[in-house]
Image (cartoon, helix red, strand yellow):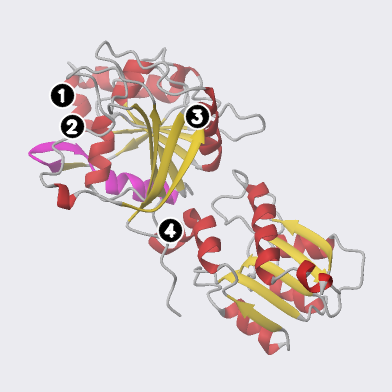
Amino acid sequence: MQEDRNKKTPEDYMRQVLQLAKQGEGKVSPNPMVGCIVVKDGKVITTGYHERYGGFHAERNALLNCQENMEGAELYVNLEPCCHYGKTPPCTEIIIEKKIKKVYIGCLDSNPKVRGKGVKILQEHGIVVETGILEKECRIFNEVFFHYIEKNMPFLAMKYAMTLDGKIACESGDSKWVTGEEARAYVQSLRNYYKGIMVGIGTVLEDNPMLNCRLQGGRNPVRIICDSKLQIPFDSKILQTASEIKTIIAWNPQKASSLRSTERNLEDIKIKLKEQGAILLEVPLKEKDGMQQLNLNYLLQELVKQGIDSILLEGGGTLNASILKEHLVQRVYAFIAPKLVAGAKAKSPIEGSGILKMKHAIELQNVETMMFGKDLCITGRIGGSVCLPEL
């Protein structure tokens, strides 16, 4: 009886798989995070995870690391095994080769090259396959990958920190610091997780941020600056490090020319920016609410071509409002500090014209709350949970 109570369920193993997969965070994009556990006679005999982009997938890492006879074993993996040659051989091949008896899969792969084909190949070779183990959790775990592969757009997460009365800075402009050290440390993990980080030129001019990842062993995100008029100072921290950290400046010739006295002056500025290591990305304008602004949808489409599967939006209120109005945000991280600063002119996290009726307010779904010291973080999806694919 005691033995039955201690016996692990497929769901128990899948939770372990997700913990393994998380070790690839910040290292595998635009691939998904995947973990793998192999069990024989009720004992885990090997584990593995996708460690880096271009490296072996989780299943191959686990099976190659095992010295025991795996014939008749069960394999647990959070994503359907691949069945095509890419940067590495297909995982279905080695699963068949090692004579695995049964494969438990969290969710199917949305990639058209896989999408149910991996399961079919395993079944054709006599391997029992069970899918849908913690399916919702596995989909949410890799929400960036699924959005990227299904929509061919970067997953965009809006992050901001505000006081209890909804201010991101005092009327004087001072904003250091709204939240405490614990909350700011968590933000560094978000910068490691998301491939890019995006701000507007207003944030650069006011705060002169570095926008790097200060997590030990972390990955610096690609910095994306929405600067239609090319106003970024040459001595800004971002440009001073643009040769070390990939930096993209989204701009528009028409907007930039309106600020410069001569065309020659603009050409000199472009040359100087490129010499400092910045990548200039020309973006067309789009009229919105009677104003011309960068076409943000076009910008994201161009960024996805560069393999940027996800972006952490740390823009000020103007950029936040624009990109939210374009329905381009998938997740929100709202950090709330138990402070009051007041001030009618103090900036709020999302500005713009706003929504006229409360019944039309944008509601977050699948809401979670986290505490970091005294600060609260509310996070949730815009548009609901990750939809399960139809097969």
Q: What's the distance in space between the residues labelled 4 and 2, CA to CA?
A: 33 Å
Among numbered discs 3 and 2, the one appearing first in the sequence: 3
Asked whether 303 falls inside the magenta stretch, the response is yes
Label 2 residue SS: helix
Tell me if mark 2 has few (under 14), some (14-19) or many (20+) residues whose alpha carbon lies within 10 angstroms of its own: few
Which residues, given as a range, are shown in magenta? 287-305
In the depicted structure, whether residue 220 falls above or below residue 126: above
Q: What's the distance in space between the residues labelled 3 and 1, CA to CA?
A: 40 Å
The kind of residue on which mark 1 rests is Ser
Label 1 residue SS: helix
Among numbered discs 4 and 2, the one appearing first in the sequence: 4
Among numbered discs 3 and 1, the one appearing first in the sequence: 3
Among numbered discs 1 and 4, the one appearing first in the sequence: 4
Residue shown at 34% from the left, 28% from the top? 162
In the depicted structure, whether residue 192 falls above or below residue 53: above
Q: Nearer the viewer, residue 139 or 67?
A: 139
Q: What's the distance in space between the residues labelled 1 and 2, CA to CA?
A: 6 Å
Which residue does the numbered mark 2 point to in the structure image? Answer: 254
Q: Nearer the viewer, mark 4 or mark 2?
A: 4
Residue 291: mark in rendering: none
The kind of residue on which mark 4 rests is His
In the depicted structure, whether residue 130 falls above or below residue 23: below
The kind of residue on which mark 3 rests is Ala
The x, y position of residue 86, in whole percent, is: 63, 64
Q: Nearer the viewer, mark 1 or mark 4?
A: 4
Which residue does the numbered mark 3 point to in the structure image? Answer: 183
Q: Tell me whether the residue at label 1 lies in contact with that at label 2, contact meaning CB atoms closer than 8 angstroms.
A: yes
Q: What's the distance in space between the residues labelled 1 and 4, CA to CA?
A: 37 Å
Which residue does the numbered mark 1 point to in the structure image? Answer: 258
Q: Is residue 23 left or right of residue 270?
A: right
Q: Nearer the viewer, mark 3 or mark 2?
A: 3
